[in-house]
Amino acid sequence: HATSQPRPLAALSARERAALVELEPNMHVVVDRYVRPRTRDEGCSFALLKNKDCEKSIDCFISHCWNHNFPEFVQTLHDALEGEETVWICSFALNQNADISAELGSDTLQSPFARALRESEEVILVLDKTAEPLTRSWCVYEVYLATLHRKRLDIWTHDWSPEMFKQLAERVANLDVRNCKASNPEDHARIMQAIAGKEDEVNQQVKRIVSREMKKVDAMNRDSSPWNAPGSEATSWHSMEPG
């Protein structure tokens, strides 16, 4: 069969150009366009490909959503990390050409995610502008595991703006792990099985840790932030705290 070749933009009709959808530069695109092609012949993860002769221990486990704008995600990590810290990011740490579901297995506590989190020194939850991780099964589960294993957990975002606070407060108020989603519905089912009978405990722990972080950020910014300058509308966590 003849293989269809991409046509240059100038060769497309007005209707075809109007139907084009601009790709969001997120982790899905990075994995599809860069990670998988570069690791396919090696049969390993991108991290292993880059560190074959230098085994590293995990300093920071990164919990995040793949829909997050990738440049923004990278900048957030750049702001959060110090020196030569080694991070564990699933898209680079796992072999993306393998059967990920098979690697996860049936016991989420023995999954690569849970093992890496236990071995890490710290967990960082990276939020996008919509705070989507608080609607994702794996992210909520990872924050819960961090509390169980008494890990230091920090929350970082690209911009602690008033709009971000409002969005995050709404996410916290509505958080229920039972309603979270996973790219693979089977993953959500596995997580629900792992926390069966503890769903309310998971919700409470995750809400507590996120609320505490928001209060800390609010306290740090209260006196110096232009949000609270004379003549501006003050925006603080205390006025938005979920009931």
Image (spheres, rainbow, N blue to C red):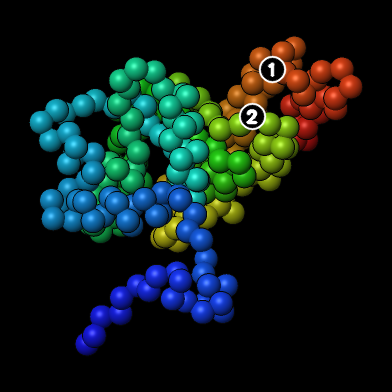
Callout 1: SS = helix
Residue 149 percent coordinates (x, y): 41, 26
Q: Residue at x 14, y 28 (%)?
A: 54
Label 1 CA crowd tier, 10 Å (few <14, some 14–19, many 20+): some
- Left or right: where 4 falls relative to 48: right
Residue toward you, 231 or 153: 231
Most extreme residue toward the left is 53
User: Picture quarter containing residue 241?
Assistant: top right
**Residue carrying label 1:** 221
Q: CA distance from mark 2 to mark 1?
A: 10 Å
Type of the residue with mark 1: Asn
**Residue carrying label 2:** 160
Residue 31 percent coordinates (x, y): 33, 52
- Left or right: where 202 falls relative to 39: right
Q: Residue at x 30, y 36 (%)?
A: 115
Q: Are marks 2 and 1 in contact (CB under 8 Å)?
A: yes
Is residue 226 shown to the viewer in this render? yes
Q: Residue at x 42, y 60 (%)?
A: 184
Callout 2: SS = loop
Is residue 169 shown to the viewer in this render? no
Residue 169 percent coordinates (x, y): 70, 37
Residue 16 percent coordinates (x, y): 52, 77
96 in relation to 17, above or below? above
222 in relation to 157, above or below? above
